[in-house]
Amino acid sequence: MLAQYFPILIFLGVAAGMGAVLLLVGGILGPRNPSSEKLSAYECGFEAFEGSHMKFDVRFYLVAILFIIFDLEIAFLFPWAVVLDEIGMTGLVAMGIFLLILVIGFVYEWKKGALEWE
């Protein structure tokens, strides 16, 4: 049984070894001339305004959750599109209802102003 997994173990060993060698070579041969700009905190194109323990606006989390929801919607659309011929009209109607519910939720969030950043 071990003979079946031996090529995979060799592949993993070679990959780990090559990764380690490349990191080591990059660390040894890479330039080391950090300036004050390279060492400064940089995020989203702006300098840090306050400390790292400042409170975030709730709208940030709301937009993040909305992004995840609509990202999952797309993740459900791909497998559905692949098997559409097999599931027929029932699958088409079910996905139409699913998309309608998501569109209604999106319109509700839009009307409530959840997507406005001011």
Image (cartoon, helix red, strand yellow):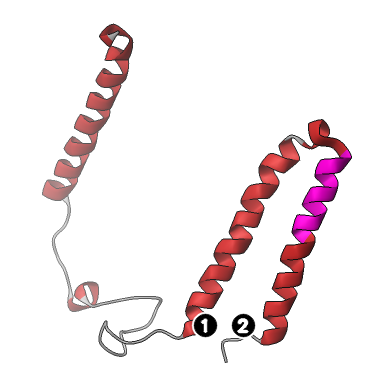
User: How far across and down, in percent of the image, does residue 104 sit?
Assistant: 76, 70
Residue 10 in the image, given as x and y percentages of width and height: 25, 19
Q: Distance between the residues labelled 2 and 1?
A: 7 Å
**In the foreground, 49 or 59:** 59
Query: Going from the N terminus, do you reach mark 2 or mark 1 first?
Result: 1
Amino acid on which disc 1 is placed:
Arg
Find out whether residue 94 is within the magenta segment: yes
At numbered mark 2, what does the secondary structure look like: helix, strand or loop?
loop
Magenta-span inclusion, residue 90:
yes
- 113 on left or right of 117: right
Q: Residue furthest right?
A: 89
Residue range highlighted in magenta: 89-99
**Is the N terminus in the top left, top right, bottom left or bottom right quadrant?**
top left
Q: Assess disc 2: are there few (<14), some (14-19) or many (≥20) residues with their C-alpha within 10 Å of its C-alpha.
A: some
Residue at 75%, 56% in the rendered image: 98
Tell me what residue is drawn at x 16 percent, y 68 percent: 34
Name the residue tied to disc 2: 114
Q: Residue sitting at 68 percent across and 86 percent down?
A: 112
Q: Are marks 2 and 1 in contact (CB under 8 Å)?
A: yes
Residue under label 1, please give it. Answer: 59
Q: In this view, does 42 lie above or below 32?
A: below
Total count of labels: 2
Q: What residue type is labelled 2?
A: Ala
Indicate the position of residue 62 as horizontal and vertical percent values: 54, 76
